[in-house]
Amino acid sequence: MRILFDSKLSLFKEPFGTLLPGQTCTLHIHIPKTVAATQVSCLLCQSDGSVPMSVPMLPAGKHGVYEIFEGSFSLKTTGLYFYHFQITAPSGTFRLYKYGDDTNMEAGEQWQVSCIPADFETPDWSRGATIYQIFPDRFHRVGESDLSGKLQPYTVHENWNDEVQWQPDANGRILNNDFFGGNFRGIIEKMDYIASLGVTVIYLNPISKSFSSHRYDTADYKTPDPMLGTEAEFTELCDAAHKRGIKVILDGVYSHTGSDSLYFDKNRSFGGIGAYCTKASPYFSWFQFRQWPDSYHSWWDFDTLPTVNKLDPGFLEYIITGEDSVIAHWLKAGCDGFRLDVADELPNEFLVLLKKRMRKIKPDSLLMGEVWEDASNKYAYGQLRRYFVDGELDSIMNYPFRTAILQFLRGHDQGYNLKNTVMTIAENYPPQVLLSNMNLLSSHDSPRILTALVDDFDGSRAEKAKRHLSAQEYDIAVQRFKMAAFLQYTLPGSPSLYYADEAGMEGHNDPFNRRTYPWGREDPALLTFFRLLGQLRKSQAPLRLGDIQFFHNEGQCIGFTRIWQNKTLRIYINRSSREWDVSGGNVLFGANLQETAPTWVRIAPMGFCITEA
């Protein structure tokens, strides 16, 4: 018989998840009587490897063949902590780790618990939001913008439905300097369309003046790219969104600039005052030169993206602390927060200062970070990131959920891994962050979800440009996509639609995930499905704010509840090839339901539903 302890269940640990300073946490461990344990303790230490605190676990009763030991502790200091158990018996003393069994008690890592600041709050509007991500150049174009200040060279497609440019130039470089002319006025014109999807937050990929179409090579942080329009038009966009109850967040790219920029000016497009041109530049201290001017640190060795010293006083003033800093500039122009590109590369001190300034200017602004792993225990560049234990970030791009959903729907998981991933993130993240997480299926950095669900092709760009789903593959992908979206919209967090996914867009990774929205060629059934999902989420508070508990996760069938203020919703997903009879109730939403009755529902293969208990 095994020793029993599961930190995700209240039977063994209470409260669930993260702790506040001074909050009491009680642990119970169930040890078989045959072990004859004489002394049990929990050894708890901070992530820095400091001397562990020993928490005595005392006998607290019996349950069948188990003896129960109980211990309590509280933490004074915020931080990431790890713990395991030490058990003494007549046979000797041993330690119990997370996946320990009869053959190896110390298998796997230790359990973790985070202590977070008592005043750590996320904006109310970010909890359970519905996000729409727009790659601005490719969403919608209205009229023509004044391109007199546009960085050269560039091309503009006359045909909105052209393929994106993917071929290298004569020097083998991918310049990303072909544009389709998507602009602020185009987004404004489609604001009612966006609202019809139940969207409450628009996330825009970079809008600042830049050379490339992706605009992660910032040329001027405070000026919109001329292709997009004017700052006044951006403010008009924010006003149009706010009138419909929609917030707007911008991409903040502060780990690097463009080489063709006001700050570096390698091409001398900005008058020769950049750090590349003169050591007397006001921006010279921002950059790290090995040998000035041609040898410098750059992002992933792309020489068009020189990295900056994020803690340089001049850079901090320009981006954060100055009266008209970049952060202040855009918040005052109408935006409601920022998504931080490559958050792992921004020091903890930078994030703390940034969040503090944002909240001073706009108290309910949101700070989201691009993190691809579990952000609660993320190490980057040899340091533990303190995103939650210092209250630095309100939200994370939730790639772990995406990976787990894909694995389940591709048939590589019977359900256990999906449950384990969801509950691990729920346990490790502060509850307010969990509800604010950006739960994505596609993004500008990943293949379109329709493609990812059926096609593992990893060939050349030339091959990917010609690769499209067959009619049969598309039907399978759509069926899986609906199930993936159903999960995305019913799990804790903020579901995020990448523009045109709802229209049936497909495509492999960059640049084929950045094609133009196919206006007039949408998949109407898929579009209707997403409008219904958006309405469902708006009408059901448990889907936005409720706690989650799984009650089934095997045989390619998933079942969980979302509970909020005495209201319980039951969610069922049948990925298997057989029918599944489940508990009944009022069916609020579903697909592929064979029969329904007051006490039971029969779900066909590849079906799903929500019932109200």
Image: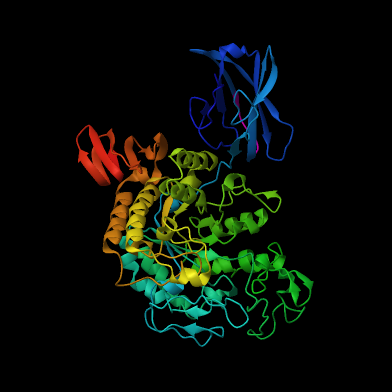
441 part of magenta stretch: no
Determine the residue positioned at 51% across, 78% down. 225
74 part of magenta stretch: yes
Picture colour scheme:
rainbow
Question: Quadrant of the image for the N terminus?
Answer: top right
Question: Quadrant of the image for the C terminus?
Answer: top left
Q: Can residue 569 be seen by looking at this rendering?
A: yes
Q: Is residue 572 left or right of residue 40?
A: left
Q: Is residue 84 left or right of residue 593?
A: right
Above or below, 205 relative to 407: below
Determine the residue positioned at 38% across, 78% down. 160
| Most common secondary structure along the magenta stretch | loop
Between 226 and 321, the one nearer to me in the picture: 226
Q: Can residue 389 be seen by looking at this rendering?
A: no
Q: Can you tell which quarter of the image residue 554 is in?
A: top left
Provide the residue span drawn in magenta. Answer: 72-77
Counting from the top left corner in percent of width and height, residue 536 is at 30, 50
Q: Can you tell which quarter of the image residue 237 is in?
A: bottom left
Counting from the top left corner in percent of width and height, residue 90 is at 68, 11
Determine the residue positioned at 76% across, 79% down. 280
Counting from the top left corner in percent of width and height, residue 333 is at 48, 70
Determine the residue positioned at 71% across, 30% down. 52
